[in-house]
Amino acid sequence: MATIQIQTERIRALNDAPTRKGDYVLYWMQQSQRAECNHALEYAVRRANERGVTLLVVFGLVDDYPEANLRHYRFLLEGLRDVQSALARRGIKMIVERGEPPEVALRHARSAALVVCDRGYLRHQKAWRNRVAHEAGRSVVQVESDVVVPVDTVTNKAEYAARTIRPKIHRHLQRFLVALKTTPLGRDSLGLRVPGLDLGDLDGVLARLTVDGSVTPVSAHFRGGTTEAKRLLRQFLAQRFSRYGINRNRPENDDVSHMSMYLHFGQISPLTIALEVQTAARGSRTDRESYLEELIVRRELAANFTNFTRDYDRFSSLPQWARRTLAEHQSDPREHRYTRRELEAAATHDPYWNAAMREMKHTGFMHNYMRMYWGKKILEWMDSPKRAYETALALNNKYFLDGRDPASYANVGWIFGLHDRPWFERPIYGKVRYMSGSGLERKCDIDGYVRKVEALTRTDAEGTPKR
DNA sequence: ATCGGCTCGCGCAA
DNA sequence: TGCGCGAAGCCGAT
């Protein structure tokens, strides 16, 4: 039957309150910002059909979302506009309302039979859902749609490394790697009169929000939305995927999918990507395996990390061996020293690093291989590893479209030894893995990368879209 | 081009 | 309790 597509482990009642007589089922959308392959949405449609009522979808848009700026809001709203029209085509009313997400949800919960929400793995996302569950006065059901295998199905603790979580994920893959079909909504909700923001006028909406405008939007490089995510994915699979295994660590090329930012905003489901990759015509077994390893094992290790680690955004979350060895080398002399301001200005002595920093600032993205080098050098050049960690995380979250994601915390942690193993001891890094500029020269065409970034920056100045 | 050594701790086999 | 092995490392030797 259809319900098999929503595995019971994805569904969790967040309170014991009963369902009420109500005008509609409310889907409070927050993490899974899409109209397709969204388990929370399909669950809500089925519950509405069961009760013979209709479905209302609301999204709470808050001005001061932690660390978000104009760049992120623009991409977010482009995506929500896409969701709104896709849901309208299914006869489902969706509104975006300004306010604290739990308050927006609670406002519309008052006329609802029950509330369905999706799931997030960061502390504020959990706090929002807890509050709604406590105050809604009716059943609140959370449906996970952000990972392939739900985090608590995999394990009940923070995993030590990829190798420990890998078999625990693989055990369940077959059961969870299943397409989700859409269920038609019985009673159309487009006639509901609920006011919301006019997403036809994004500039107007953005102008009225009190948002940090210091980081510019990057629509010329990446546009938000499920439609755009799927277009990029199709293009990647058709044109670049067959080279993925060879080129994934070659930043001079762009043979990567760019899915991280769409995943961050929930604009595409990891399930959709995984199923497409499994059946992609181009690409060898190695390409498939290495892509799925990153998409599922590495990404879900990050979800595991933030879900089970209280201080996932602090230096104290690093493994003990790493903190110990970094402390032992804290006062080692540094050949180069930079402040956050100098780093942010891409004004170091290292042209490779500066290019990476410029790619990040100008496009909201950085090739994954360069992200490692970029972070390792911040550790090397700042006067304390703790300050380096805080700086790398702050810059990551400020400039990347995929910043503030569970993957951000795991990736920045990895620079400082998280989910990694010790290597032979050297100055500053201690036993934490080191990376060098000569490694880049040996393993890829790093000058090609620098030229690529120069070209990107040039097209920026001319205002010509690049992709 | 390829290889071994560096180093810790998890998880499994025994 | 012992042992194998691990996200992308580097370096020097062959």
Image (spheres, coloured by chain):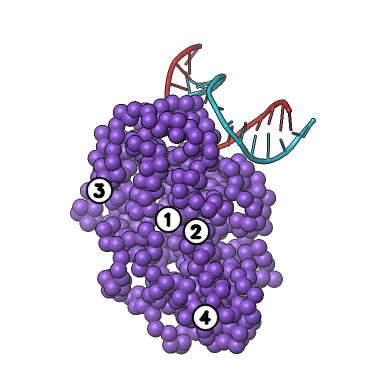
Chain colours: A purple, B cyan, C red
> Going from the N terminus, do you reach mark 4 or mark 3 first?
4
| Mark 1 crowd level (few <14, some 14–19, many ≥20, 10 Å Cα) | many
Determine which quarter of the picture holds residue A96. bottom left
Determine which quarter of the picture holds residue A4. bottom right
C-alpha span from label 4 to label 3: 47 Å
**Discs 2 and 3 share one subunit:** yes
Q: Looking at the picture, tell me which residue is in the foreground, A29 or A177.
A: A29
Q: Which residue is mark 1?
A: A404
Chain under callout 2: A
Numbered label attached to residue A109: 4
Q: Position of residue A171 (x, y in %)?
A: 68, 50
Type of amino acid at the residue the image marks with label 3: Thr
C-alpha span from label 1 to label 3: 24 Å
- SS under mark 3: helix
Residue at horizontal 39 percent and vertical 74 percent from the top: A99
Residue at horizontal 35 percent and vertical 68 percent from the top: A63
Numbered label attached to residue A457: 3
**Discs 1 and 4 share one subunit:** yes
